Each structure stands twice: as C-alpha cells, then as structure tokens.
Amino acid sequence: MNALDLQDIHLTLGGTSILNGVSLHVAPKEFVSILGPSGAGKSTLFRMLTGAVKPDRGNILIKGQPVAKHTRTFAFMPQRDALLPWRRIIDNITLGLEIQGVSRKAARQKALLLLSTFGLKGCEAYYPAQLSGGMRQRAALLRTLIQERPIQLLDEPFGALDALTRVTMQRWLKNRWHQARWTTLLITHDVREAVALSDRIYVLSRRPARVISELTVNTDDTRQQEARLLDILLTQTGDP
Amino acid sequence: MRENLSKWSGGRFTRTLPAVLSILAAFSAWEIFVHMSDISPLVLPAPSRIMDQMVLNRAHLWTNTLPTLQATLLGFTCSLWVAFSFSICIDFLPRLRRALFPIFVISQTLPLVAIAPLVVLWFGFDLTPKILLVALVTFFPMLVALVDGYDATEPEIEALLTSMGASRWTVFRRARLPSAMPYFFAGLRISITYAVVAAIFSEYVGARAGLGIVILNAKNSFRPDLMLAAVVISSLLTLMLFAVTAILQRICLRWRYAGHAP
C-alpha cells in the first residue's frame, strides 16, 4: 500500500487555477521528487498537504485512508531554513517535539543523541546566525526528521545555498537517506538534484499544474536522464 | 580574556571620546561667551553657575526629581500593559485594528498644551493626571511598534509551526511575539524619552512637586540658573532611563548580539 496517494487534485486560489488534476503516489521508504518550473504550484501542493489550503476536488489518501482533519503525517521543511533566530540550535531542533507536547528535557535528550550524525556536535548552544548556511540547513533537516512523522516534505531545501555547499549537502543527504530511508517527497527545480536523490521523479507543467511526465531513476545512466528531464522542462511545460 | 577585555574597553573609550569632546567644547564655548560678553546671569547663566546651583539646591532638586521619576515610570508601565493587551487583541481580531486605530491616531493629534490642563482639571493635582498624560503620549508608539512587529514575522516560520500542528496562540507565542521584540525595544527607546517630557509638562500645568514645578517656580522668580539646573536633571533622568532600556534590550535580544561562531 502506498504511503501517500494524490488522486486527481484540483485547486483554485483567488480565481486562479493552481492544480489541474494532479495525481501521484509515494511508496513507503521511497524518495520521490516533484520537478517543475518556478511558480508551477509545487509549494502550494505542500501547503495543501500540511493543511493550510484545501483542494476543491480530488482525494488525498494516506496509507489508503482519506486524510483526517489534522493528521500528524507530514514533517515539513520550508524553502529557507526558517530557523527561529532567537532560539539556540538545540531549541530549534526540538521545536516540533515541544509543540507535540514532549517535555523540553526529553526533547533535548533525543536531539543531543542525533547531533553528531548531522554534523552539528558542539553547535547546540549557538544561535542560527552564528552558523554557516550548510550547518543551518542540516539543523533544519534534523528539526524535520526528529519529529518522526511518516512522510517528509522537503521544499527546495538547498535552494538558498551556494553551488558548492548545495552539492555537499545533496551528497550528505543521499548517504543519510540510504541509511535511514525516510519516506520523502522533495520539491525542486534543479534537475541534477532530482536525479541524484530520487527513486522516482514527477514533472509538473506550468500553472495550472498537472503531471506531464513520470520517470523512475536508473542510477546507471544519470546523464541521459538529466538531459531528458531538462528537455521536458524546457519544451513541454507550457508557455511561460 | 584579559586582552579581550582591555580591547573592548579601549574600543568603547575611543567610541565615546568624540561625543565627550564635542559636549565639553560646547559648554566651554558657552562659558567663555558668558564671561567675555558680560551678559547678565538673569538672561544667560554660565554652565559653572548652573553647576553651583545644582550643588546648592541638591536636596530641593532631589525631592522634586522623585515625583517626576515616579510619574514617568508608573505612567509608562500602565501604557506598556495597555498597549500590550491591545496589541494581542488586534493581532487576533484584525477588524479591531480598523475600528480602533483611527481613535488612537486622533489621540495623538491632540495638543498636549490643551489636554494637560484639562486632565489636571478633571483628575486634580495628584498622580493620576500625570500617569494618564504619560500613558497618552507613549501608548500609541508602543502599540504601533508591537503590531508592526507581529506582522514582521517571517511567513515561512508561521507555515512551519502550522505544519507542526501549532494552534494560532502557539504561533503567536512562539513566533509572532519574539519576532516583535526588536520592534518593541525600538519603540521603548523612543517612548521613554517622550515619557519624561510628558511627566514634566503635566507637572508644569499643575502639581505639588516635581521637576516641572521647579521649572515653573524658577521661571516665575526669574531664576534661569535654577531652571537650567532642573533641565540638566531632567535630561540626566532621560539618559538614565534610555540606558536602562538599552541594557534590557541587550539582555532580552541576546541572540542579536551573539558574535560569529569560532
């Protein structure tokens, strides 16, 4: 059974049609990317999953069940790291747990155990502004994963990083993912990132968005797949 | 550590030196002018004479500083609490903003010269009218600082908290309120200076004691030296309160002053 199914989702916001029959699925322990041009409605898709907006039509199924009003299914990592600047790194990491009602002490203990895996050992007492972009992003990722929600939603997590740090972070995430295999849905407009990290890739058209292509990544032939995806993005997503 | 400390105090010294020098220069010029021009001390007293008066009348000045300080602090505290309560209501009920802001803006357009005597007329010579006037002057800047501060919260942080299952109140407490703190302190620094001026002015209009009364009496008995002595005290008072807010800001916004990680 799939971890997540979206069936024929339609969404209109303020008179603009954003999603026009989007269907996709994510299997358990699968890493799926949604690739699409800027402004295609990718982030809106995530806002819909986290409950901020409601679809006009279509079904969202989690493990085959319709999504309840407020589920604790998704852990969301926004585009910029969105670390709270007034909280120390450790308290940023435990934010989600605290909101779930976990005591601060228990949350901290859990976070401290994971710091070294995320290359953040010794940084717990710093404020976000004191750390580099890569470290902040790792902290944001740990803040997402520590909530142990069934599905991770990553919205262009490395978009704000410089090119070198971005590749470093992608490689690091890939290694971490191979060890832990969190069920993940990633939004990106970076073809190489999608191919490097994913099991499967959906390509969305421009607004109103629909799935125009689906591709299972074959690790033997990444170059050709990157070229194909780029071609689809450049020629088939519709007029800008 | 020792080296850091000396470097820090050295830096502070060189930073404050220009200000100290320019103030000294201005007072020296004033002093020299008074001595050279033979101007009557009833028109323009020299700084040295003002200093003498401050020392001579220190007990009198001190007993009159306390009521002013009291009125300032009480009025400002009231204003802070009311502004904070209103800011929360407005944040949760945006319609309230449209209903109330016009009234608050109008309250800021009323000339203090006209309002102060009326408030004294209505509430007497006690502390109440002073508290009200200080609050009237400082309430709106504080409210605007807080409301604008809440609105300056990063939308991504709010989206993140919502995705974690946070309620509207949790979002307010964890994100909107801390986001407003830098704005709050900016408002605090400005308002505290208004507060002292408002307290002195409300005393000037009618009170039993206070720096405003010292100034009024000194004016009526043609004693500009004593007037200026009270003025010096009132600016020292303002500077002191300003320093307190700066220190509070330093403590509450520690994250803003943290240096880069090594």
Image (cartoon, coloured by chain):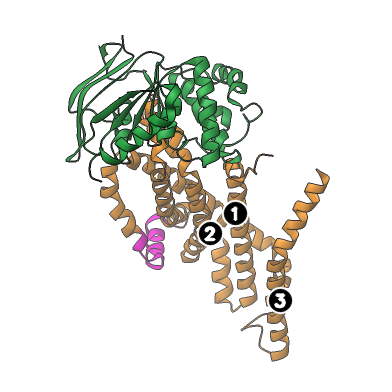
Chain colours: A green, B orange
Q: Which residue is mark 1?
A: B241
Q: Which residue is mark 2?
A: B193
**Amino acid on which disc 3 is placed:** Ala
Which residue extends farthest top? A1
The earlier-in-sequence mark between 3 and 2 is: 3
Question: Quadrant location of residue A122?
Answer: top right
Is residue A93 part of the magenta span, yes or no? Answer: no
Q: Chain of mark 1?
A: B
The image quadrant where one finds the N terminus of chain B is: top right
Q: Nearer the viewer, mark 1 or mark 3?
A: 3
Mark 3 packing: few (<14 Cα in 10 Å), some, or many (20+)?
few
The numbered mark at residue B25 is: 3
The x, y position of residue A23, in whole percent, is: 24, 23
Q: Which range is magenta?
A: B108-125
Residue A111 placement, left or right of B1:
left
Give the alpha-carbon distance from disc 2 to disc 1, as whole Å.
8 Å
The earlier-in-sequence mark between 1 and 3 is: 3
In the image, residue B154 sits, relative to residue A229, either above or below, namely below
Q: Do badges 1 and 3 share one subunit?
A: yes
Q: Chain of mark 3?
A: B
In the image, residue B174 sits, relative to residue B246, either above or below, namely above
The x, y position of residue A126, in whole percent, is: 62, 34
Give the alpha-carbon distance from disc 3 to disc 2, as whole Å.
25 Å
SS class of the residue under badge 3? helix
Q: Nearer the viewer, mark 3 or mark 2?
A: 3
In this view, the residue in front, B141 or A58, is: A58
**Amino acid on which disc 2 is placed:** Thr
Q: Residue at x 69, y 61 (%)?
A: B59
Pointers 2 and 1 in contact (CB under 8 A)? yes
Is residue B116 part of the magenta span, yes or no? Answer: yes
Give the alpha-carbon distance from disc 1 to disc 3, as whole Å.
25 Å
